[in-house]
Image: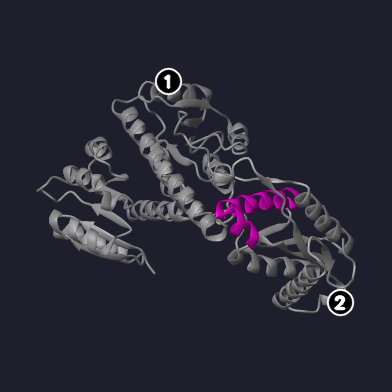
Amino acid sequence: MSARILVADGVATSRIRLKVRLTSACYDVTTTGTAEDLLRMARETRPALVILGRGLDDPHPIQLCHRFSQDPDFANIPVLMMTDPASRVDALRAGATAVLDANVSELMLLARVRGLLRDADRAEDPGFAMAEAQASFESARPLIALIADNPARAIAWRRLLAQNLSYRFQTMDTEEALGSAADRGVDLYLIAADIQNHGDGLRLLSELRSRPGSKNAGFIIATSSERQDMESIALDLGAGEILPLDLNPPGRVEVAALALQAQLARKKRADSRRAEARRNMMLAITDPLTGLYNRRFALPRLAEIAEAATGARSSFALLALDLDRFKAVNDNHGHAAGDAVLRHVAQCLTHHVGPDGLTARMGGEEFLIALPHHDQTQAFRCAEAIRQHIAASPVTLPGANGGMTITATLSIGVAVAEGAAWHLPPEDLADMIQERADRALLTAKSMGRNKVMLSQAERAA
């Protein structure tokens, strides 16, 4: 589905021209000629982008931009202002996400639109791989990396920007910039489009955006007046803003300072949304009491482990675990005591399994452990170590039972998938191994509890 763009301009010919240019790029464009309609339509249609032209008189476009950007209902909607260069500072101060000359080329207009829509999409991306979050600058001043075409320019940038902003600035060469991606320390990169050779700044931008440690940073490209042909390319490669290479002429450093502030603010909002999305995702797949994965996550993950083992012709083991006489703990000591036992068991399981295995609470007092690349002997040893650890570790009870300790025990069923099972589809293999582990668990319970039972052997501990 194409992105919805709302264009507001008091001049009909300007609206029509913008609509034609954007519609030709397959965007869903709606237009209005009044501020009242803009605010109403923005609430009703929730556009992905708002473009403000110069033809609005009541209120003035700058005032309307400020009103729009300050409205909580529109907090996540970027605003692109089409105005004259002399009004750029006022537009940025009013909260415009980006500013373009009203007579901009179609190439540059579409590149800027693509960039704004891309950044909005990235802000909503939760990053399912759950990589380490980008370092926050809540308590530390943001770090800006300056990669110029020569050392003197980098020093001049730092001097001029430091006069207007209380951020940390560090000049870097290309190698240092790439190295900075490893520690996730840079919040924004200001890069000359041509560092030593034509276009190598754009290649650096592309490389930094592809690396996990720097892909969520902000990026600004600086170009000379002779290299404006590179601006649309820079935006398409991921730059959030374009600045002139020389910041000395009057007014330019103020524009640059506002641009840096805007990019950092966008990065902060995007980081916050990604962190919230990760939190929500973790809540959906983890058990809130123990912090282990829940059943919803564990069963599909078990099928993935079975598929990987089948493809690699490698064994894997499954442990079904159940606390013995857990109901008596709740009945005799209360549910707070039962929760303390469950948390204690979860910590023990996590310690013994480590990051390479899967540990989940399946419900109540039932747990599941999957151990890739484990044969029967290894799986039994792991299960026995867990059983002994739990039995030898009294749990201190909270609340009214504070100071009292009880000892919990586990019964464990172990099943191993190896050669003979590789012909099964992964889902069937996972179901079969889980069923065998469950049967072994029931056998362990029937033989007196606090035992480890292998699914294909009458061996117990």
Q: Is residue 455 above or below residue 53?
A: below
**Residue at numbered disc 1:** 159
Say whether residue 24 is left or right of residue 230. Answer: left
Query: How many numbered marks have been drawn onto this rendered protein structure?
Result: 2
Amino acid type of the residue that numbered disc 1 sits on in the rendered structure: Arg
Q: Nearer the viewer, residue 123 or 219?
A: 123
> Counting other residues with Cα less than 10 Å from the Cα at mark 2, is it few (<14), some (14-19), or many (20 or more)?
few
Q: Main secondary structure of the magenta part?
A: helix
- Residue 329 is one of the magenta-drawn residues: yes
Mark 2 vs mark 1, CA separation in Å: 70 Å
Q: Secondary structure at mark 1?
A: helix
Image point 59% across, 55% down: which residue? 129
* Residue that lies at the very extreme toward the left in this rendered image: 58
Question: What is the quadrant of the N terminus in the image?
Answer: bottom left
Q: Position of residue 347 (x, y in %)?
A: 68, 48
Mark linked to residue 116:
none
Q: Position of residue 365 (x, y in %)?
A: 65, 62
Q: Cβ–Cβ below 8 Å for labels 2 and 1?
A: no
Quarter of the figure with residue 158? top left
Q: Earlier in the sequence, mark 2 or mark 1?
A: 1
**Residue at numbered disc 2:** 420
Q: Nearer the viewer, mark 2 or mark 1?
A: 2
Q: Position of residue 342 (x, y in %)?
A: 64, 54
> Counting other residues with Cα less than 10 Å from the Cα at mark 1, is it few (<14), some (14-19), or many (20 or more)?
few
Would you say residue 16 is visible in this rendering?
Answer: no
Q: Secondary structure at mark 2?
A: helix
Applied colour scheme: one colour
Q: Which residues are magenta?
A: 327-355
Would you say residue 400 is visible in this rendering?
Answer: yes
